[in-house]
Image (tube, rainbow, N blue to C red):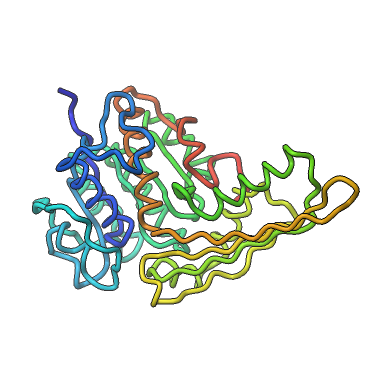
Amino acid sequence: MIERVRLAVVGVGNNTSALVQGIALHRQTGSLVGVNRPVVDGLGVADIDFVAAFAVSEEKIGRDLTEAIFMPPNNFPPLDCDLPRAGVPVTRGLVDTSEVDRVAAKLAGAEVLLYSAPSGRPETARAYAEAAYQAGVAFINTTSDPVARDTGLMNRFAAAGLPLLGDDLASQFGTSVLHNALLRLLAERGLTLVSSYQVNLGGTEDFRNLVENPSSKKQSKLNALSASDKVELAPLGYLPQLRSQKVAHLNVEARGWGETAVSLDVKLTVHDPSGAAGVNIDLVRIAASALRNRHGGYPAEATPLLKSPPGTAI
């Protein structure tokens, strides 16, 4: 039987809640609903064990991971499954970059570190990457802060035989994925784009944080849309009443044969953390497989799952 992946997580928020609960649901029911790849290099959806978790919220520190994921301000709903205790107490995360050695020591026994903290904290993201490097652990950056796009850091991970994946998730079925597909379809069918925009509203803490720190996220979204100068991104909107749901509005204005007008409006409603977990489940297994096969650096297999993989704009 294949050895399960030993996973550590940074950030015990909604995305981690969706991942923890989704794995438990799969183990109990075998359901493959919403699963893109049941097996990745021999690793199934259930073949992941959580071995460490880091957070800065005083309410979460010291609690078992399966209890901490339901602490406010988390608002991803409980799934219909039993959730046995993980036996993993949440550890205090980095307070400043001087604590890299402490975090690296806590990663003993882990294979993969999934960085799922809020975007907009580039120094913190880099510090956790350094901790993973010191501990000999693969690192996945799910935020829009540039980590895997740092050529120097990528070269160090590659030389050490450690996988480095990032940056920024392309949600399983999110605004960027849908918007990009519509723009590609327009071009494939020979229509001329006049203008397009997207509006994103959400109620999670990550949305609240991105409203306050939007710069890296906006660039990452533009990366995912090929940065056309005819595409506009409205500022993100935080509406707490939406809870873990995201509501997106897309508009496309184009011209067809004879310069006739074509107009398209789309509304998308999803649970944002589910979209993240549906991608993270694959990234974790890709990272673990690369580590076990001693393939350091960036595995190209991860590219479709990311908005800003190495080589895209900072």
Residue 179 or 86: which is nearer the viewer?
179
Relative to 299, 184 lies left or right: right
Relative to 259, 34 lies left or right: left
Q: Quadrant of residue 157?
A: top left
The residue at 46%/59% (across/down) is 122
Residue 164 or 75: which is nearer the viewer?
75
Give the total of numbered labels.
Answer: 0
- Residue furthest toward the right? 258
Instruction: State whether residue 215 is above or below residue 289.
Output: below
The image shows residue 164 at horizontal and vertical percentages of 42, 38
The image shows residue 72 at horizontal and vertical percentages of 25, 73
Relative to 120, 231 lies left or right: right
The image shows residue 297 at horizontal and vertical percentages of 44, 32
Q: Quadrant of residue 44?
A: top left
The image shows residue 263 at horizontal and vertical percentages of 73, 58
The residue at 12%/51% (across/down) is 86
